[in-house]
Image (cartoon, rainbow, N blue to C red):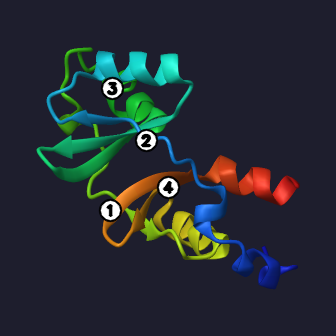
Amino acid sequence: MDQGDSSYSSIKVQDIMTRALITVNVSTTGLQVAKMMEQGGIGAVIVKDGDNLVGIVTDRDYATKVAANSLPFETKVEKIMSSPLITIDQNESILTAAKTMASKKIRKLAVSDDGNIVGIITSTDLVNQLAN
C-alpha cells in the first residue's frame, strides 16, 4: 500500500467495518460455532466470558485447531479461540488496520469505540476497499 498511502490513511476503519457481530459464550461448542458461521455466511465470532470479550474464533482457528488436530466437535470455544482479542479503534485509518493485521499475522480485528466492541474489520474488507 505504498502508492496512495495518504488516501488510505484518510479512510477510517468505521467507514468499511461490519457492524453486525455475533458473540458466543466460552462454553459454546465448536460445532455450534461452525453452524453459526455457516448459516450466517461469516468467518468469525467473538467470544465472551460473562460480560468480558476474551477472544475470537475464526474459520482459520477452526481449520488449524479443530480439523488439523481432530478435536471433537463438542470442544468448547475457549480451547479453540484466539486470545487475547486484538482490537483497533474505529477512528484509526484502514492503513493502520492493514499494518496491524500484517504485523500480527491475522485477518480480522475487533473494532472498538471508547472501549466497547462495535464491529469487525477483515482483510476482505480492506481488499474490497482497494478494488473500488
| Front in this rendered view, residue 81 or 114 | 114
Contact (Cβ within 8 Å) of mark 3 with mark 1:
no
Residue 50 vs 76, above or below: the answer is below
| Camera-side mark, 3 or 4 | 4
For disc 3, the neighbor class at 10 Å (few under 14, some 14 to 19, many from 20) is some
The span from disc 3 to disc 2 (Cα, nearest Å) is 22 Å
Tell me the mark number nearer the camera, choosing from 3 and 1.
Answer: 1
Q: Amino acid at mark 2?
A: Leu
Callout 1 amino acid: Asn
Quadrant hosting residue 74: top left
Task: Name the mark on residue 106.
Answer: 4
Secondary structure beneath label 3:
helix
Q: Is residue 119 visible?
A: yes
In the rendered image, the vertical position of residue 27 relative to residue 3, given as above or below: above
C-alpha separation, residue under disc 1 versus residue under disc 2: 12 Å
Among the two numbered marks 3 and 2 on one chain, the one whose residue lies closer to the N terminus: 2
Given contact means CB atoms under 8 Å apart, are the residues at marks 3 and 2 in contact?
A: no
Instruction: Specify the farthest residue to the bottom.
Output: 6
Q: Is residue 109 above or below residue 96?
A: above
Label 2 – label 4 distance at C-alpha: 18 Å
Which residue is the site of mark 1? Answer: 116
Q: Position of residue 44 (x, y in %)?
A: 45, 38
Q: Earlier in the sequence, mark 3 or mark 4?
A: 3
The residue tagged 2 is 21
- Of labels 1 and 2, earlier in sequence is 2
Q: Which residue is mark 3?
A: 66
Which quadrant of the rendered structure holds the C terminus?
A: bottom right
User: Residue 108: in sight, yes or no?
Assistant: no
Residue visible at 70% across and 57% down? Answer: 126
